[in-house]
Image: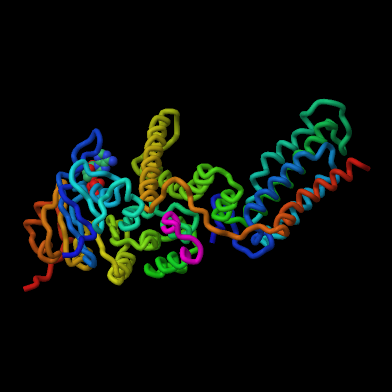
Amino acid sequence: MGARPGLHLHIDGDSVLHRLPAHAKVVGLLAFALTTVAVPAPGWWPLTVAMLTGCGLVALTGVAWRYVWPRLLIEVPFLLFAAVLPFVASGPRMALGPLQVSEVGLLSAWALAAKGTAAVLAATAFAVTTTPRDLVVGLQRLHVPDTLVGILSFMVRYAAVVGDEMRRMRIARESRGFRAASLRSWPTLGRTLGALFVRSFERGERVHVSMVSRGWTGTFPTFATATAGLVDWACAALPALLVALTAAWALAS
Amino acid sequence: MTTPVLDLRGVAYRYPGSHQALYGVDLHVHAGERVALLGPNGAGKTTLVLHLNGILRAGAGTVEVSGLPVTDAHLLEIRRRVGIVFQDPDDQLFMPTVRDDVAFGPANLGLRGPELDARVTEALTAVDVLGLADRAPHHLSFGQRRRVAIATVLAMEPDILVLDEPTSNLDPASRRELADILAALPVTLLMVTHDLPYAAQLCERSVILSDGVVAADGRTLDLLGDADLLRRHRLELPWGFAVPRAD
Ligand SMILES: Nc1ncnc2c1ncn2[C@@H]1O[C@H](COP(=O)(O)OP(=O)(O)O)[C@@H](O)[C@H]1O
Ligand SMILES: [Mg+2]
């Protein structure tokens, strides 16, 4: 289950990363991303290590690469931007094969692509090994405010329901000969959007009534999950630590 | 006479800034009874249901649940005693997994740990969906979601199970499976429906709510056999159906 890309990122498995408690993973991912972003230019070694670490994390998930590729597509716009940078940036030029490119641009492109790739790889490794449920419980454990956790968990739950409603309304529109072809169709689309909003609002009220009916008084019950021990936290910190140590070594030498 | 599980006297309600939905409803349901609440669309059935656990408060009249009046002081206990399963299971299932959703109610009542787990297992078993415990609600079929919705309420061990239009949107097979499950549940039942054969199958007694008042209250087969009564309240048996006469 859950192999539909986009909405359901998680893929079942039983790797170290699957078993690591979600809150440790959240903190580890955040630390890794921040450390990687903070690596000073040019950072050849630390960023290479960061990308390798990212690949290593994805490999650790045990999920087949053909499932991972589609999830990496999110990075394509950044890579395109990075590819253009050496040509449009100003400053002294240098020769790259037959081409004249900006030196600063080339360095920035390297940093952007490397940092982006490392972070996206790590985030993918996180996403495919963490169920929405574990993420929600993990955020609760990290004392993220209840309201935020609630909003996140409702988004996960109702994205499909609202998407379905949107699709039904489009089908109903088109079944009666409507085609969104010109500016003149915008008022109709606007009204549909309004109707969708009203429906979602009413849904929210009904969900609230059903929650209150089961004794809800304003705080979400937390359900016990695995607690993170010292080993878990150490594992979670490892990727960030690798990058930081390489960066320190590169700076020193 | 024992204290009725549900005791409604003269319940009237007007939606703020809108028209009067209930005009004085009297209804008593005793432990172990299975009662169908019949009525056409707009009769006020859902409005009445929302009075049973204090979501709406009667403008006039009183509601008591097993002797406890519905007031702010007893709200949590009232909501434990009256388990309402709403019409659209998507409104009722809002947690990331089926297990968490079923645990939501008992957890609000303060249960934790093994006791909570036992409640969840028991409720899921009662509606025959224990295998779905770790699934996400939006990955289930409509019939499965309906059953899980019932489990979320059973887990609170209510005195009375109230179902609002349980057969809406169910295909015939899911409808029959649900009937089998409901027939086997050892609970007091109030079932809101306009599915008359379903009422006949599951409920010995029926109450007709029409235009905000109780228009009839009696044995289901007697009410359904009275063609005039049904017609007056915009109720109809499906084409080709007839009620077997008792005598
Ligand atoms: N939130 C509301 N505000 C105003 N009027 C309402 C609201 N909900 C229902 N009504 C009205 O109250 C009447 C009874 O509705 P309802 O209890 O939903 O009927 P039923 O469930 O029997 O179909 C209907 O006329 C309906 O239009
Ligand atoms: Mg209704």
Q: Is-magenta flag for residue B91? A: no
Asked if residue A248 lies left or right of residue A30, the reply is right
Quarter holding residue B23: top left
- Picture layout, residue A78 above or below residue A186: below
> Can you give x and y, in whole percent of width and height, for residue B18 in the image?
22, 35
Q: How many numbered tags mark residues here?
A: 0
> Can you give x and y, in whole percent of width and height, for residue A175 in the image?
36, 44
Asked if residue B42 lies left or right of residue A175, the reply is left
Q: As drawn, which residue projects farthest toward the bottom?
A: B247
Q: As drawn, which residue projects farthest toward the right?
A: A253
> Can you give x and y, in whole percent of width and height, for residue A101 in the image?
83, 32
- Name the quadrant where ligand 1 sits: top left
Quarter holding residue A88: top right
> Can you give x and y, in whole percent of width and height, for residue A117 in the image?
73, 46
- State the extent of the magenta-drawn residues as a range: B106-117
Q: Which residue is located at x 80 percent, y 50 percent?
A: A242
Q: Quadrant of the N terminus of chain A?
A: bottom right
- The answer to whether any part of residue A66 appears in the image is no
Asked if residue A81 lies left or right of residue B230, the reply is right
Q: Which of these two is toward me, B231 or B184? A: B184
- The answer to whether any part of residue A155 appears in the image is yes
Quarter holding residue A166: top left
| Type of secondary structure dominating the magenta stretch | helix
